[in-house]
Amino acid sequence: MATSQPTTAAAPKKPAKARGKAASAKSSLSHSQDTYTRWFREMYLMRKFEERCGQLYIQQKFGGFCHLYIGQEAVLSGMRQAIRPTDRVITAYRDHAHPLVLGTDPKYVMAEMYGKKTGTSKGKGGSMHMFDKERNLFGGHGIVGGQIGLGAGIAFADKYRKEDHVTVCFLGDGAARQGMLYETFNMAMTWKLPVIFVIENNQYAMGTSVERTSNVTDLKTLGASFEMPSATVDGMSPEAVCAAIAEAAERGRKGEGPTLLDIQTYRFKGHSMSDPQKYRTKNEVASFVERDPIVHVRSVLLDNNWATEESLKAVEKEIKAQVEEAIKFAEESPLPDPSELYEDVYVQTDYPFVKD
Ligand SMILES: Cc1ncc(C[n+]2csc(CCOP(=O)(O)OP(=O)(O)O)c2C)c(N)n1
Ligand SMILES: [Mg+2]
């Protein structure tokens, strides 16, 4: 298959920042009322959860790092719509929204933020290490690019066991510069692994723009020397993301191997909570906030008479209450017992390197 083969979901050639507002809500709808309703609910949950995390972090309710996902929600909603619940997901440290979209109860995600025993990783992972075995979420990884090889490894295991799952392996535009990417791309193409490499290209790695990290700024071309099918996708549109990931998943399930998607998105907030954001202008941020995917989905629902202002307000109220309940649960949960420190480190109880 040709490198950089355009998919139905390829974004216009202009960089995302140069494009105008989301297309009119009524034009060419490819999804049902149920889908838009679900997108609204889950994106609103991701947004409110993250807004509250930001506030709680400032109030020093929990420590460590805190990387918010605000602005990038359409990537996860589009992905969730395109895959099966049995498919696998792995990501980096900007990972609070991934369990939420996969259906993990927000209270367990919030408890992990607080380092509590009831958290998704029993309070031993924190913000950067969300896992959910039942929902096939394999983390949550703090080493930039570390999950690229792991994602291909999960896909290798599925292929070896002859199971038809696909793995969606998320990575940042900064992680795309890691050597791990090239070794993994080579193996994934050689063995035609069912893995979709999704660059969540929010245009910055901490304060460093894509333009400053390489001569190559069209990230879909990173797969070119491996002849990996690839495309650029508008990450502010859940419809475009869904179409691109669905096509890539089908390719993976048919045994045709991996796909690379450069999904162009934007984080409305700083890299982490301690980012003065001197590397970008307020106008640049505003140009993306104008394309807020939640506003887009909201207007699709209203313009098609699939919802009313009142019904959406009721959903918002319900979700805000759910997030508050999650905070209460987290605050009231116990801390892990110090005796649990060495539990869940190795699967094998007699692992030869474990010493007393
Ligand atoms: C191997 C490694 N190098 C450096 C860091 C420090 N670091 C943390 S986040 C980050 C930027 C990564 O940016 P990107 O991959 O674009 O993800 P984003 O934060 O935009 O989601 C860096 C360099 C790290 N955690 N691991
Ligand atoms: Mg980035």
Image: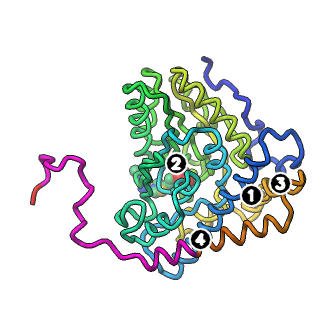
| Residue at x-position 57% and y-position 38% | 84
Residue 330 shown in magenta = yes
Q: Which residues are magenta?
A: 325-354
| Disc nearest the viewer among 2 and 3 | 3
Label 2 to label 3: alpha-carbon separation: 35 Å
Main SS of the magenta part reads loop
**Ligand 1 within 8 Å of the CB at mark 2:** yes
Amino acid type of the residue tagged 2 in the rendering: Gly
Q: Residues within 10 Å of mark 2 (few under 14, many from 20)?
A: many
Tag 3–tag 1 contact (CB < 8 Å): no
Instruction: List the residue tagged with mark 4.
Output: 323
Label 4 to label 1: alpha-carbon separation: 17 Å
Tag 4–tag 3 contact (CB < 8 Å): no
Query: Which of the two labelled residues, at mark 4 and mark 3, occupies the earlier sequence position?
Result: 3
Residue 222 found in image quarter = top right
| Disc nearest the viewer among 2 and 4 | 4
| Residue at x-position 66% and y-position 34% | 244
| Disc nearest the viewer among 4 and 1 | 4
Q: Which x, y percent locates residue 276?
A: 59, 70
Instruction: List the residue tagged with mark 2.
Output: 174
Amino acid type of the residue tagged 4 in the rendering: Val
Query: Which of the two labelled residues, at mark 2 and mark 1, occupies the earlier sequence position?
Result: 2
